[in-house]
Amino acid sequence: MNYRRRCVLCAFLAAASITVAGGGEEPAAEPSLPRGFTVGEELVYKVYWGFIPVGKTRIVSRWIEEDGRRLLAIRYRTRSNRIIAAIYPVDDLIESIIDPETFLPVRFVKKLKEGRRRNDEVTTFDFEKGEAHWVDYYKKRTKTYPIDADTRDIVSFMYFMRSYRFEPGVRKDFRVMADEKIYDLFVTAGDVEEVKLKRFGRVKSIRLEPEAQFEGLFVRKGKVTVWVARDQRGVVTRMVGSIPVASIHVVLWEVHGPGDDFWIKQTNEILEDGKGEEEDPDVEKALKELDE
């Protein structure tokens, strides 16, 4: 695989790990939690580069105790599959520690392993002082910058967004922390469409077109479109990103956790039928053809 294609693959795996909105030990019923979200939910997304499966993103949530406080931890983990890992291994971890009473972040952690690239950053939020403290452990850099009263990192923001029910034609503006800075994020809602998922059939979802200036949630160049289910759970069902040399597809693959709605029942049925894991197609052959 040539260098350009490796970079594109790496970028999209990283984007997938943050774009889509996980398993805990105890369900929660705090009224401040986003619509349709119960702690203990676990979402699995399959990531494709064109028609080639390249990895999976798993998003889990759980309760933790820190300094006598009960906090919510939401963790994203994206890994390349076995064959892709032999070419360009990706193992990215993104985690947000959240105060469940305000649903504001306490700490944001980003640890990326992409080929030879390494990243280890932690951002701590102090809303009383109105500032965030960022540390880059690899580059030995620190930075303190002002934040707003409702500033959220990208993970807590994505879950907070489940409280919104977008209507077609509506545009909303937000402020989000990413890359140790505060950015404007614009989201425009399109039509309600039927998204066809291999494991869940046709799901009514609203098309959202976000625009941002930071890397990670959305790529710097190209266009990303996200579809969100029009039901109580409100999960991302599909994401498509495109740039001049490639395209990425992220599709909802499994839903686990408390509850017995359509998503949980369908996932359990698939696993009981022994269809939990499927062999990937001849990825090596497909990659070789791309380079010819």
Image (cartoon, helix red, strand yellow):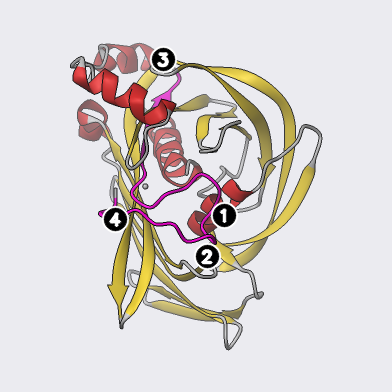
Tag 4: residue type? Glu
**Is the residue 47 above or below the residue 138 in the image?**
above
| Residue 106 in picture, x, y percent from top left | 45, 73
Residue wearing tag 1: 160
Tag 3: residue type? Lys
Residue wearing tag 4: 26
**Is the residue 185 above or below the residue 10 in the image?**
below
Residue projecting furthest to the bottom: 129
Q: Nearer the viewer, residue 133 or 174?
A: 174
Residue 1 is at least partly visible in this image: no
Rounded to the nearest whole Å, what is the CA distance between mark 2 and mark 1?
7 Å
Tag 1: residue type? Phe
At x 52%, y 25%, the residue is 247
Label 2–label 1 contact, CB within 8 A: yes
The earlier-in-sequence mark between 2 and 4 is 4
Residue 73 is at least partly visible in this image: yes
Disc 4 element: loop
Residue wearing tag 2: 103
10 Å crowding of disc 2: few (<14), some (14-19), many (20+): many
Tell whether position 171 is magenta.
no
The earlier-in-sequence mark between 2 and 1 is 2
Magenta region: which residues? 24-50
At x 45%, y 37%, the residue is 12
